[in-house]
Amino acid sequence: MRLGVLDIGSNTVHLLVADVRPGGRPLATTSQRTVLRLMRYLAPDGSIIEDGVRALVAAVAEARAVAESERVDELLATATSAVREAANGADVIARIEAALGQPLQVLGGETEARLTFLAVRRWFGWAAGQILLFDIGGGSLEIAAGSDELPDAAESVPLGAGRMTVQFLPDDPPGPEAIEALRTHAAEVLRPVAERFASQPRPDHVVGSSKAIRSLARLAGYPAPGWSSIERMVLPRRDLKAWIPRLARIPAETRQELPGITADRTFQIVAGAVVLHQAMKAMEIDELEVSPWALREGVLLRYIESLSWNAPAA
């Protein structure tokens, strides 16, 4: 069976096509991404302006065409914080559904964290024990912890890299005062979150799973012992901290020349680095490992699980 997962996020509209079977691992065949950076299109009242909605609808229509050309049996379409929190979200959702020709599932922040945690658990396996997860999107930061397939604690806070760039780092490159203002804001938001997670057992593995974190790991990290750099990276907090002022001094158009920094992340990678560093500091984490699986894989895995339970016995 061929499935498509369409992830309508704050930074990109990303289609992942994979072949799946009950009880099997999803095998990706196609990945198509359109960079939008929806935070640029937010009006003062929190609504997405018309130019942004049109760009979003066009990206969704293009993804639908790709899914049809790939002969996808079912398209699982989800939207996260940018659409979820927009003041005109209901109208935007209606226009997206018209472009899709089907309903759109709008994920809450905690659901987003839980699905991402499921993907990370499956990637690392049961032997990984207690996992603490960080996932930075364009609009929000998800944190989850637990020793099972679903986390015992999961939270979403509005510290996404795109959102923080618009609010705190609008200049290119940003000045040190702006960086310090973002650092202070992130620390204040994360303080009560860290207190609530303090009751969780000390993690056996700390994992980052978003594209922003993977980019930062390729820039400032190193391959995990026994793994290739493609399979798993380790990102130390001290090295991440050292890179922040260096990244902040470089104009956005030049950052993509650095290892791991792709064109779609150049504008918001500084904010992502500041937020991730503060999250690791708040939770007293010295380093994290990077998972290649995240939300899209979590959506796929949940669907495969439903197929597995409903499949007829051999």
Image: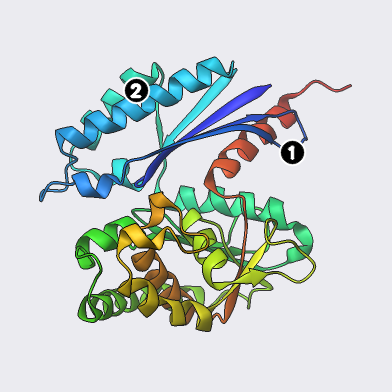
Asked if residue 200 is positioned above or below residue 107 in the image, the reply reads below
Quick check: can you spot residue 284? no
Taking 295 as reference, is 305 left or right? Answer: right
In terms of depth relative to the viewer, which is nearer, 121 or 277? 277
Among the two numbered marks 1 and 2 on one chain, the one whose residue lies closer to the N terminus: 1
Taking 221 as reference, is 265 left or right? Answer: left
In terms of depth relative to the viewer, which is nearer, 258 or 242? 258
What residue did someone put label 1 on? Answer: 25
The residue drawn where x is 64% and y is 39% is 301
Decide: few, some or many residues near mark 2? Use Cα within 10 Å; few <14, some 14-19, many ≥20: some
Decide: few, some or many residues near mark 1? Use Cα within 10 Å; few <14, some 14-19, many ≥20: some
Quadrant of residue 28 within the rendered picture:
top right
Q: What element carries label 2?
A: helix
Residue 2 coordinates in the image, percent (x, y): 65, 23
Pointer 1 with pointer 2, Cβ within 8 A: no
Taking 53 as reference, is 285 left or right? Answer: right
Quadrant of residue 290 within the rendered picture:
bottom right
Q: What element carries label 1?
A: loop
Asked if residue 102 is positioned above or below residue 87 in the image, the reply reads above
In terms of depth relative to the viewer, which is nearer, 26 or 28? 28
Q: How many discs mark residues in the rendered view?
A: 2
What residue did someone put label 2 on? Answer: 97
Residue 271 coordinates in the image, percent (x, y): 34, 66
Q: How far apart are marks 1 and 2 (CA)?
A: 29 Å
The residue drawn where x is 53% and y is 52% is 114
Location of the N terminus by quadrant is: top right
Check disc 1 and give the amino acid type. Arg
